[in-house]
Image: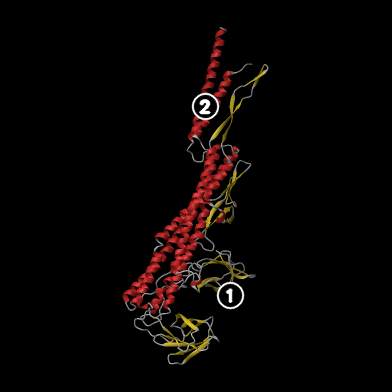
């Protein structure tokens, strides 16, 4: 037995050839997305014993490994999820911010123009041209709010479409990962190409939602989304779907199905693009829409209310300029019933006090133990509602009517009092003479103590006992006993009644009473005569532009919209900051992965030269062995 130079040279050539192949493959895939560089590990062949020594017999490639760090890959997935969520939020908020900056600017402009037109009517109350122009301004205001609501509805539809598209892609990735798991189980997790493909799919999946990867003993990997939903288990893939929203069908939700079982998925736990889209829709778009509805209700209620205090050119009590705030078109979407309800109650919401509305949403729960509980979804504050004659009272500016049926134990409804307001707002007045520029004259008796004042809320010409335009009515108040008596123009008594909550609503006159001390005979006369050139009600209407009528007396009509606009701008700026931060974290994780698993062309070029020289040296050994063999053969001829 002797040392086999040819065999040693052969193993060296084969090992160098393998090293060159691995290096070449790394260089070829330097720009392949998701590729992890590979390294070939060499080992010495088993030595042989000659005489008193052991001699090597060459080398071989013991393993070709994929350079992969699970911890670095996990950090990269987390960074990808955060960055995708931040980028999606910023993108959607930027779109909405642009809508408010471009389309939305006409809303306060139109409102200011309408106030200016009413002021013009006050200057020339009998000019029909100015009155027609004022109605045109009212129509522009309504159209602007309608258009703004249409833009918000378009954003909701677009967001829903994005959610559906991402869900479809997640299902495709789930099926691909299930198929790859089958291949990995066959190779016992050794096929680098399949592993790279799996890693690239998992990284893409982490854009859409938070991903947890669970290695299995079989070589496969189970994939969970959001820490709670199993997307892939071995070769079995779960299917995600989009179903109609509950309680509002136009706000779809997502679910997961495997076999005949379907579970609803909590989007707040998903993260990534999906979580960001749901958060944008539910926490920004829907509140913006309800706040826009709050403004529309404020506009309609303010001007319609002022109309009911005045007298138009036709010599009648002013009628509505805009649709009534409780018109069916203005009330669309105020109540949503959950699909789990077992009762048959048909519900509707009636706006009682626009100024007390918050623009938020509520959840109404009924149980036999706690009765009717109304919870503010933003603050979590709970209010016990009182049921009387089919009406639930106790809401902030609204009441809930049970038109038919009854609620069962465990039933719940979502209440959005201002929903539908902006979409349903329209001008119902067609006659410019209908603008009630004039107003009744209120005259306190000279003998009054001065401790009592009254303010007119509205007039109703259809109410019993209304004295009619051109007449007058006098109320004598006893604020100590909380009673009153009314008299007509001739001084004849019309009747008596009680003062309720410092308010009188009788004979078509609704007014509030303010008294600093009890008095037994305070007299006030409403002169309902139409005086030529009277503009008192138009002046009062125009002066409301800066009045704090909304949000319990803390905001004007314009501020309701401007506050929403500022809030969206603030959210957009915060999202921009989050993008910068998330991108930096992702880039740091990406650099770590690249430093370990990425292809360094300079390093690979050096390896190429090294293994080439090794190949040439092994070939030289073979040549030397051949020369030695020839020399020995020649010597024995």
The numbered mark at residue 509 is none
Spatial separation of the CA atoms under disc 2 and disc 1: 88 Å
Question: Mark 2 sits on what residue?
Answer: 610
Report the side of 41 relative to 507 (left or right). right
The numbered mark at residue 387 is 1
Q: Are marks 2 and 1 in contact (CB under 8 Å)?
A: no
Tell which tag, 2 or 1, sits nearer the viewer: 2
Please name whichever residue, 131 or 143, is drawn nearer the observer in this view of the structure. Answer: 131
Q: What x and y, as percent, mark residue 618?
A: 54, 21
Q: What x and y, as percent, mark residue 485?
A: 50, 89
In this view of the protein, can residue 444 be seen by the observer? Answer: yes
Q: Label 1: few (<14), some or many (≥20) within 10 Å?
A: some
In the depicted structure, whether residue 265 falls above or below residue 595: below
Looking at the rendered structure, the secondary structure element under dot 2 is helix
Looking at the rendered structure, the secondary structure element under dot 1 is strand
Report the side of 134 relative to 219 (left or right). left
Please name whichever residue, 27 or 263, is drawn nearer the observer in this view of the structure. Answer: 27
């Amino acid at each position: 037995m002797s040392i086999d130079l040819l065999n040693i040279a052969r193993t060296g050539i084969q090992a160098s050839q393998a090293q060159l192949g691995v290096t070449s493959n790394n260089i070829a895939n330097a720009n392949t997305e998701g590729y992890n560089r590979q390294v070939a590990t060499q080992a010495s062949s088993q030595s042989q014993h000659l005489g008193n020594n052991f001699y090597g017999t060459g080398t071989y490639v013991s393993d070709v490994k994929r350079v992969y760090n699970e911890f670095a890959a996990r950090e990269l997935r987390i960074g990808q999820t955060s960055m995708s969520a931040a980028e999606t939020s910023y993108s959607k908020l930027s779109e909405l911010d642009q809508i408010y900056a471009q389309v939305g600017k006409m809303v306060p402009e139109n409102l200011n123009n309408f106030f200016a037109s009413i002021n013009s009517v006050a200057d020339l109350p009998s000019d029909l041209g100015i009155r027609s122009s004022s109605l045109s301004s009212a129509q522009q205001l309504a159209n602007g709010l309608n258009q703004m609501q249409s833009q918000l509805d378009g954003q909701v539809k677009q967001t829903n479409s994005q959610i559906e598209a991402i869900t479809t892609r997640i299902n495709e990735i789930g099926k691909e990962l299930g198929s790859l798991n089958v291949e990995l189980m066959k190779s016992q997790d050794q096929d680098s190409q399949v592993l790279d493909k799996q890693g690239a799919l998992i990284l893409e999946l982490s854009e859409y939602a938070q991903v947890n990867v669970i290695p299995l003993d079989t070589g496969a990997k189970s994939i969970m989304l959001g820490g709670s939903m199993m997307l892939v288990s071995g070769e079995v893939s779960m299917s995600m779907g989009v179903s109609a929203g509950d309680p509002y069908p136009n706000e779809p939700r997502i679910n997961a199905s495997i076999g005949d079982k379907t579970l609803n998925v909590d989007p707040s736990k998903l993260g990534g693009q999906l979580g960001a889209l749901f958060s944008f829709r539910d926490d920004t778009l829907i509140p913006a829409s309800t706040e826009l509805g709050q403004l529309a209700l404020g506009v309609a209620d303010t001007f319609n209310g002022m109309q009911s205090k005045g007298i138009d050119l036709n010599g009648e009590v002013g009628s509505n300029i805009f649709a009534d705030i409780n018109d069916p078109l203005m009330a669309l979407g105020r109540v949503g019933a959950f699909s789990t309800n077992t009762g048959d109650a048909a519900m509707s919401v009636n706006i009682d006090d626009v100024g007390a509305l918050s623009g938020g949403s509520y959840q109404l729960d009924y149980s036999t133990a706690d009765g009717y509980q109304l919870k503010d979804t933003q603050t979590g504050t709970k209010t016990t509602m009182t049921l009387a004659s089919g009406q639930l009272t106790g809401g902030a500016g609204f009441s809930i009517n049970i038109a038919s049926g009854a609620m069962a134990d465990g039933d719940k409804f979502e209440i959005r009092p201002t929903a539908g307001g902006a979409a349903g707002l329209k001008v119902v007045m067609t006659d410019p003479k209908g603008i009630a520029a004039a107003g009744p004259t209120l005259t306190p008796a000279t003998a009054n103590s001065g401790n009592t004042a009254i303010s007119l809320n509205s007039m109703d010409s259809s109410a019993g006992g209304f004295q009619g335009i051109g007449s007058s009515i006098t109320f004598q108040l006893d604020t100590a006993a909380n009673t009153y008596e009314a008299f007509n123009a001739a001084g004849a008594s019309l009747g008596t009644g009680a003062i309720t909550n410092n308010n009188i609503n009788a004979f078509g006159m609704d007014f509030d009473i303010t008294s600093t001390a009890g008095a037994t005979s305070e007299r006030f006369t409403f002169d309902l005569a139409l005086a030529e050139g009277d503009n008192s009600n138009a002046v009062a209407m125009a002066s409301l532009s800066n009045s704090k009528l909304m949000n319990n007396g803390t905001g004007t009509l314009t501020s309701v919209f401007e506050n929403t606009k500022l809030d969206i701008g603030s959210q957009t700026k915060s999202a921009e900051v989050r993008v910068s931060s998330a991108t930096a974290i992702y880039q740091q994780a990406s650099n770590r992965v690249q430093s370990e698993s990425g292809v360094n062309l300079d390093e690979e070029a050096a390896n190429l030269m090294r293994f080439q020289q090794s190949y040439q040296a092994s070939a030289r050994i073979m040549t030397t062995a051949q020369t030695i063999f020839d020399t020995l053969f020649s010597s024995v001829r």
